[in-house]
Image (spheres, rainbow, N blue to C red):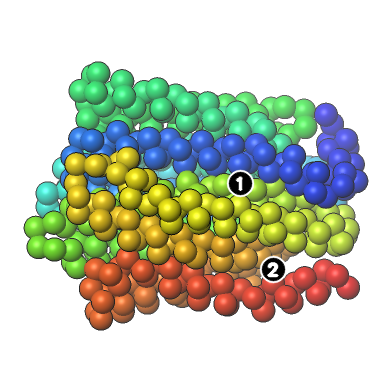
Amino acid sequence: MSLDTKYREMTETPVPRLVMRLALPSMVSMVVTSFYNLVDAAFIGHLSTEATAGIGISFAYMTFIQAVGFFFGHGSGNHISRALGARRVGEAGVMASVGFFTPLIIGIMAAAIGLPLLPQLVLLLGATPDVVPYACQYLRYILIASPFMMSALTLNNQLRLQGNARFGMIGIVSGAILNIVLDPLFIFVLDLGVTGASMATAISQFLAWCLLLWGTTRSESVHISFANFRPSWYCYKEILAGGLPSLCRQTFNCLAVVLLNYAAAKYAPRGQEASAVAAFTVVSRTTMFAFSLILGFIQGFQPVCGYNYGAHMYHRVRQSYLFAYSISTAMMTVLAILGLCFAPQIIAVFRDEDPLLIEIGTRALRWQCAVFPLVTLCTATNMLFQNIRMPIRSTLLSIGRQGLFFIPAILLLPLFLGLHGVEMAQAVADVCTFLMSIPFAVWITKQLGK
């Protein structure tokens, strides 16, 4: 398929059918990625509670990797999408190369700095003394793989925002399947424990990176080349405009994970700090799996939005936004009901040997499931603003959930409610975020309808 054919497909195909077609590979990619994170947690969970807490500590650094990857992926990808909609193919090629090589360089620098300071890094991320060895074991190979993980996230988003999500799906799914196969082999057969899980993740992420890079060589994709790596103020200004919301969102996600680890350890029953941290680790992985479904679906409307905004077909932008919001809300309502009903069984899958972990995890998961349907409004509206280059509004929405509301909630609620305040902090933040999103959603819907 040529780029001209892709343009006609993106601007002429009926919107619901087009969004569904593009959403399917994105959903598969997101779900499979989240699933192997769940598998990681489940295998490690049966080693020990401290090991489970260790991957929870490491998750804070993983959100930093996501912050860099999504910043350059969304920043360059949104510009590529609009450039292709306006038929500026050469400009799209330069942006793709700048967006790819920059996080690759940043990942090399992060690994070079982080590896010598590994024990200090995990303590900074909230590890208690009994959890430090496990966090170091898991984080070591994640640091080594940082360049590939960051640039792979960038490539996946660039391909998706061009309307080529199936190539991204091939890379992500292949890496995830390899991880699922290697996890039990490295953890139990080779008896490498937490280190084996980390090695499995690093190897699978490198495979995904190779396949994603291959996807950019296809005829319907914008090609990556070092000759097009021409960094400029214009390129980084455009990446900043399109990627700042993602950077802010992921940065606050990282800070939120660190504060959650500290709060869980501080307000846990004495001597049970590892159980509390592990419980919130399990809940985070579980809710991430649920969110991956709606994120994958909502991502299906982003290339439709970018192409048609660049082509000045604003009625199609509005239609894709409303369609994505409606379907994703219905999906989250179903997931909320399932989570509320089966929360204890879900948590026990990860570590049924620890009753306190199950007790804390069950309460926290039910609080979050209760507000699942409210999360989609902010997510869809934020992605819309990000695609049509309204960075201030998009950034404000992106920092709302974990920045404006969760951080105050995790700092204040436990002062009055103890551990129960930690368990309900995310739900309180989600309600506040929903209320903040309503006027933004109403305004942009009216604007696009004019």
Residue 314 visible in the snapshot: yes
Question: 183 and 146: which one is in front?
Answer: 183
Mark 1, Cα crowd under 10 Å, few <14 / some 14-19 / many 20+, is many
Q: Residue at x 38, y 57 (%)?
A: 365
Disc 1 versus disc 2: distance between alpha carbons? 22 Å
Mark before the other along the chain sequence, 1 or 2: 1
Query: Looking at numbered disc 1 in the image, what kind of residue is underneath it?
Result: Gly
Measured as percent of width and height from the top left, residue 234 is found at 68, 58
Tell me if 247 is positioned left or right of 416 in this view: right
Query: Looking at numbered disc 2 in the image, what kind of residue is underneath it?
Result: Met
- Report which residue position mark 2 lands on: 390
The mark closer to the camera, 1 or 2, is 1
User: How many labels, in total?
Assistant: 2
Measured as percent of width and height from the top left, residue 64 is found at 41, 53
Q: Is residue 402 above or below residue 303?
A: below
Residue 136 visible in the snapshot: no
Question: 62 and 270: which one is in front?
Answer: 270
Q: Which mark is residue 104?
A: none
Q: Which quadrant, please, contains the C terminus?
A: bottom right
Tell me if 406 is positioned left or right of 297 in this view: left
User: In the picture, residue 264 is in which quadrant?
Assistant: bottom left
Mark 2, Cα crowd under 10 Å, few <14 / some 14-19 / many 20+, is some
Q: Residue at x 49, y 69 (%)?
A: 430
- Report which residue position mark 1 lands on: 296
Tell me if 205 is positioned left or right of 20 in this view: left
Measured as percent of width and height from the top left, residue 18 is found at 80, 44
